Image: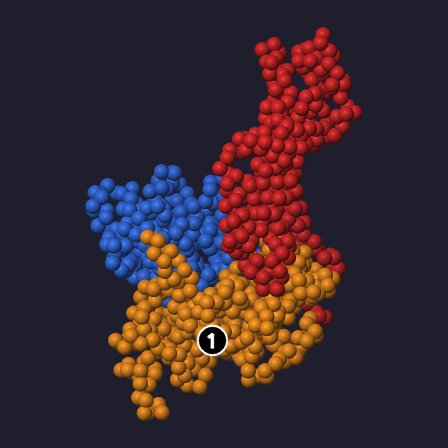
Chain colours: A orange, B red, C blue
Amino acid sequence: MSVIPDGHDPFARDRGGPAQPLLSVSGLYKHFPVRKAGGKKQVVRAVDGVDFDVLKGETLGIVGESGCGKSTTAKLLMGLIERDAGGLLYDGQAVGERAMPWRSYRREVQMVFQDSYASLNPRMTVEQSIAFGPKVNGVPGREAVERARALLARVGLEPRRFAGRYPHEISGGQRQRVNIARALALEPRLVLLDEAVSALDKSVEAQVLNLLLDLKAEFGLTYIFISHDLNVVRFISDRVMVMYLGRVSEIGLSDAVLDAPAHPYTEALMASMPSLDPDNRTAVALLAGDPPNPIDPPSGCRFHPRCPLAEEVCGVTEPPLDGIRPLHRVACLARQPGSGHARAPNPALAA
Amino acid sequence: MTAPVTAASMALDGGLLTADDAAPEGAFVSSRGFWGHVGHRLVRDPVAMGAGAVILLVVIVAILAPWITPMDPYKGSMLRRLKHVGDATYWLGSDELGRDMISRLMLGARLSLFIGVTPVLIAFVIGSGIGVLAGYVGGWTNTILMRTIDVFFAFPSVLLAIALSGALGAGIFNSIVSLTFVFVPQIARVAESVTTGIRRRDYIDAAKLSGASALTIMRVQVLGNVVGPIFVYSTSLISVSMILASGLSFLGLGVRPPEPEWGLMLNTLRTAIYVNPVVAALPGVCIFVVSIAFNLFSDGLRAAMEIRQ
Amino acid sequence: MSSSEPAVVLRDLRVAFGKVQVVDGVDLTLERGQAIALIGESGSGKSVTLRAILRLFPEGRSRIEGQILAAGRDVQALTKRQLADFRGGDVSMIFQEPLLAFDPVYTVGRQITEAILRHETISKGEARERALALFERVRIPSPERRLDNYPHEMSGGMRQRAMIALALSCRPQVLLADEPTTALDATVQIQVLLLLRELQRDLGLSIVIVTHDLGAAVEVADRIAVMYAGRIVETGTAHQVVLDPHHPYTIGLLRSRAEGALAKGSRLQTIPGSPPDLANRPPGCPFAPRCFLAEERCRREMPPVAEIAPGHRVACWRTEEAASAYRAGPTPVRAAEPVLA
């Protein structure tokens, strides 16, 4: 029993078939100009050449630290900021062109923000916020309100008690449920969750994660799940993409990437997660210092100044994102045959 | 959606349970709403309520003035000039032409309020429009609009009002027009800064993602959040407007005699300041009290509108 | 203060803001040189407990009852002047947001030397020497140069280190840390946690750390105290609390973590319901309405604190059932009955 007319058949709106990626991102760039002291103009290379696909029905996790470009990527995917270069293909159609104008694209792709309070209009009731989207898309007022109430019930908020409330009258977890309901009100196929559970208490986070799993199954959704918490990403994602300073450093099936990281940065990230075992506490931090600033990224491999495997070649050659196994791509010279790195696998053996 | 919603799933997380949680079956809990909360808090503010009462009293008197003045405010008598306050016939004395002060003050409230409030109201509408547009659209539109507005800030408001009134000529209509010109830039500036602050909120982004047009977003999402602060700022301008309007009349650029208006009365009575200072000061007292009342009320309104998270 | 005396002792600490009893009878002892973590969710009273040790509340609007002993001083009895010396001198604190601890218009080095000079009569040069030593101590790279940085010129992790240096500037015996790593990136968080552990070991510092992250707590703390609705429900060594929990709330917290999920894509176990309204406490155990083991007695009577092993104390009527439910493995443990009528 679905709120959404064709929601029970996730493939009703499908065009290219299951093998075609739902969203295909290629060569995405975004540089922000900044003025440093002294009036010298510089650019923040927030997103600097990112390619990836989002497969139909999967959850793609995106992880990385501050400055890695994951939030900028999210805003670029949603068209909230304009991209400098790059292409977006939604189910095989170029976004922003005639076949898939932004307006239709946005009905298919919705987003949930991190800050549950800032993403709700403080002067609108919960129900008005959810019904706004359908209303501007031509759903009659009465029907939009009905849909809002049904969605509220679906995300676990009893409409009778919550529909008329204002955002400041409900808790953070409840607000995030409202935000999820609002995102679903336009019947999207792809939902982008930008640190959507990061600000919540752990036990509330677990409830919202469960809700996300349920909704995905019920409405046949595809998720892009951005988070800094590797444990949560591992739990919810089928595939995971690791970003560092505006580029993709590793992408692959989440168990493969997180259990046996191929990129030294992924390995360091994994090692940084606090252990829950008092008898085996973390002994040393693999990385020193803070993630560097994306204003002036290092030459060659961007990770090389902090990398334990770094060699001379790493400061010169920028590693391409190459497949090392099916569905597993890494941007690290030490993993690529013939790269000139001493640890690189032998090309003859690899071939 | 007919899946039974279990009680357990209703109370999923967080949120302190309030009285609303015991709502009767079937009734949708409707929250008091933002303005409900503001009203609720305003009523508990004694200063704002006192100021509000003064404003209300003056407004009522102004409306009813033609019917309730004890004497004819236009009819003077050379024999009864400048009676003192507390006179048996003229309770608040009489002016330099022997007209009853209390009647003239009551009738004067009409014009004084009218030319004090009207420019602010008009400027509120125009200024909010310009400011919200500039703030929401940003970029070049913002630069052009706001730099133009800045030109007006180069002049002190009193000077600007006098200059415009002087250029347009004396009269009620012209003084309203010139005062409106004085206030539009100020209100637009506030509206622009409030809107700019809101434009970057996530809920505006969320509204954009729903495919709403810029106009719809401004009307539905932005306006509700900015109209309050702009309104509060505007009410604080009413007192300035009343004083400026009185000033214009005082200089002979506003209301013309024999119409009673507090500023004009202050002007004509100034010759009597050594003979009967108390009566001469009365219109000034009225201007003072009403301005203060508007200011205090606007302060209370601002305090009541500060929402907590 | 004699070496055997504990660093911090709280006896029946109660803090109320108006009608809201935020901390409701906390007993806590921190031995010298130990690190203890207070963990709990928002509204559990953990931060308020921490702040009470420094009396960081406006006098009029809060009511603190009970006994607070820290670094050998009775905090409740301190005068305003003594309190000013006590804060920073005997006991100091670090926060989640270092920008709040620093004045943006002065260099970090100047603020640290001034803090030293305020508490001690030494020359400016000596104070600067000490600031430099502190910067080396907290492992700030090129410390000499960094002392002349303004707070905004530092990266987040470095600011956090600088704040720790500031907190240590007057050689306190006790360091209070309020969510010190919550705003940091993972690779930086682990560095700061390891630094805290190192300071505890090398300087003999006693540390109270407040966090909502069990993982962070395990990394630094010798002991863990789990708070719920203004009370400590379970306390013990990190080993006891994390590996052998006896309180259903602790079990719920452990079970709801994503890394503890049974299998990929399976639902996480959650704690149903919501925390109680602190202005209107129901009788009995505050966790009872959400507890999978709650029985009639739990709703009527507040459970006493039982010592189930040396140093392992739990406030629950049914510790044995809880512990065996945990040992039995992650079987679905959810409230069978509706939480709200």
| Residue at x 48%, y 60% (from the top left corner) | C40
Dividing the image into 4 quarters, which one contains the C terminus of chain C?
Answer: bottom right
Q: Is residue C20 visible?
A: no
| Residue at x 51%, y 77% (from the top left corner) | A24
Q: Nearer the viewer, residue C101 or B206?
A: B206
Look at the picture and state if C116 lies above or below A17: above
| Residue at x 41%, y 83% (from the top left corner) | A323
Mark 1 sits on what residue? A26
| Residue at x 38%, y 44% (from the top left corner) | C74
Determine which quarter of the picture holds residue A106.
bottom right
The percent position of residue A84, horizontal first and vertical second, equals: 46, 67
The three-letter amino acid code for the residue at tag 1 is Ser
Give the tally of numbered discs. 1
Determine which quarter of the picture holds residue C83.
top left
Look at the picture and state if A195 lies above or below C30: below
In screen coordinates, is B294 left or right of A195? right
Graded by Cα atoms within 10 Å as few (under 14), some (14 to 19) or many (20 or more), the crowding at tag 1 reads: some
Of all chains, the one bearing label 1 is A
Q: Nearer the viewer, residue B181 or A337?
A: B181
The percent position of residue A311, horizontal first and vertical second, equals: 26, 76
Look at the picture and state if C229 lies above or below B5: above
In screen coordinates, is A302 left or right of B271? left
Element at label 1: strand
The percent position of residue C141, horizontal first and vertical second, equals: 27, 60
Q: Which of A242 and A172 is in front in this view?
A: A242
Q: Which of B309 and B68 is in front in this view?
A: B68
> In the displayed image of the protein, which residue is found farthest to the right?
B67
In screen coordinates, is A121 left or right of C329? right
Q: Can residue B189 be seen in this view?
A: yes
The percent position of residue B93, horizontal first and vertical second, equals: 68, 14
Determine which quarter of the picture holds residue B216.
bottom right
